[in-house]
Amino acid sequence: MYTKGPAKPNGRKAAVVGAGPSGLTIAIILARYGYKVTIFDTRDKIGGVMRYGIPDFRLPDSVLDDIAYRHLELKEIQFRPNTAIGSAITIDDLFRDGYQAIFVGVGLWKPRQLHIKGESLGHVAFAINYLASPEAFRLGERVMVIGSGNSAMDCARTAIRQGARYVTVINRSDRISASEYESSYAKLEGVDFLMMKSPMEIRDDGIVLADNEIGEDGKVKPIPGTEMLYPCTGVIIAVSQGIEGNVLKSSEKIDTGRGGLVTVDEEGHTSHPGVFSAGDAASGARNVVEAVVNGKKVAEAMHRYMQSLPMPVFTDYPDVPVFHENAAEEQA
């Protein structure tokens, strides 16, 4: 069993791609077992969706900063920020450099489009981009949020905190996807809801919405002739995200399934020996608690896998002399 504090190094290395909840959990557990762990992330700070997708009023950044110090720095876990695995560095490069097991937890950072006219206009934002830095956007005082999941509630409540006076959530169906807890807080803070509406077009001065109906097949569809322009100054599209595929495209040995998600077994093994995955990258959007639970299970699987391998060779030049600044003076 791993120790609670820093462990004696066991001479093996593991790589974690993605500093979200699953990746952080795995890195901490493996470090406690004595592995030298390096975390790679495309952003400059740890946390993943916890930092860049959950508003500060729900999860303060100070909590994540404390984790970075107490659980990463003190356990000598290395963090390599602003580094996208799959571009300059590939999965094969990581194996070349002595990492015996690699965890892929890249998260869902690719916004899902509506595929309607107007999505590229300047007063439109995708939820994942907006929540990462809401102060960077200028959406005005009347904001429309398309979608009704927890992310949409976060966007609506954040827009209010950014100065919007009127915020409306637009939903295609007659049921809100967000939890009752999240939607109730949005309502308490003054967010309005437009149900059974389909966005047809985004314009500079608003959104064209059509009324919806439920067909005999049970599917929701817009009613022709019911289109109406709803004025607004800003639009946030919050209809889920997909996986960024660069790290997966860099290795043809990693199988993917529906939506580009990584195909894994119950312990997180992918089709590529030594590569593991869990969290959003493998199962789609889940909450932080589920990500941590899955991370613990995958960390144990990675530990068993690495212990079954021979000790790695980290250098091709083990016997070269060490350069000293004053070597020439000593010889003289």
Image: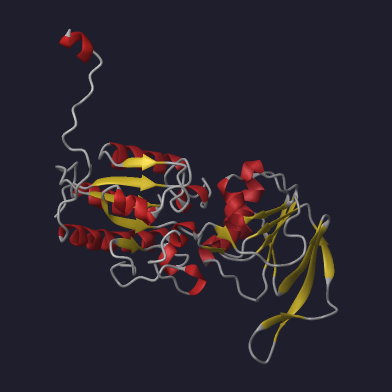
Q: Residue at x 25, y 15 (%)?
A: 325
Q: Position of residue 7 (x, y in %)?
A: 16, 43
Q: Residue at x 32, y 59 (%)?
A: 295
Q: Nearer the viewer, residue 140 or 127?
A: 127
Q: Position of residue 73 (x, y in %)?
A: 30, 37
Q: Nearer the viewer, residue 6 or 143?
A: 6
In the image, taking residue 44 as reference, residue 79 lies left or right, namely left
**Does 68 appear above or below 27?**
above
In the image, taking residue 242 as reference, residue 69 lies left or right, namely left
Judged from this view, the residue extending furthest toward the front is: 332
Quadrant including the C terminus: top left
Quadrant including the N terminus: bottom left
Location of residue 178 by image quarter: bottom right
Q: Position of residue 158 (x, y in %)?
A: 61, 49
In the image, taking residue 207 as reference, residue 50 lies left or right, namely left
Q: Nearer the viewer, residue 301 or 200?
A: 301
**Does 329 appear above or below 186?**
above
Q: Nearer the viewer, residue 97 or 133?
A: 97
Q: Position of residue 251 (x, y in %)?
A: 41, 61
Q: How many marks?
A: 0
How is the rendered protein coloured? secondary structure
Q: Residue at x 52, y 52 (%)?
A: 53
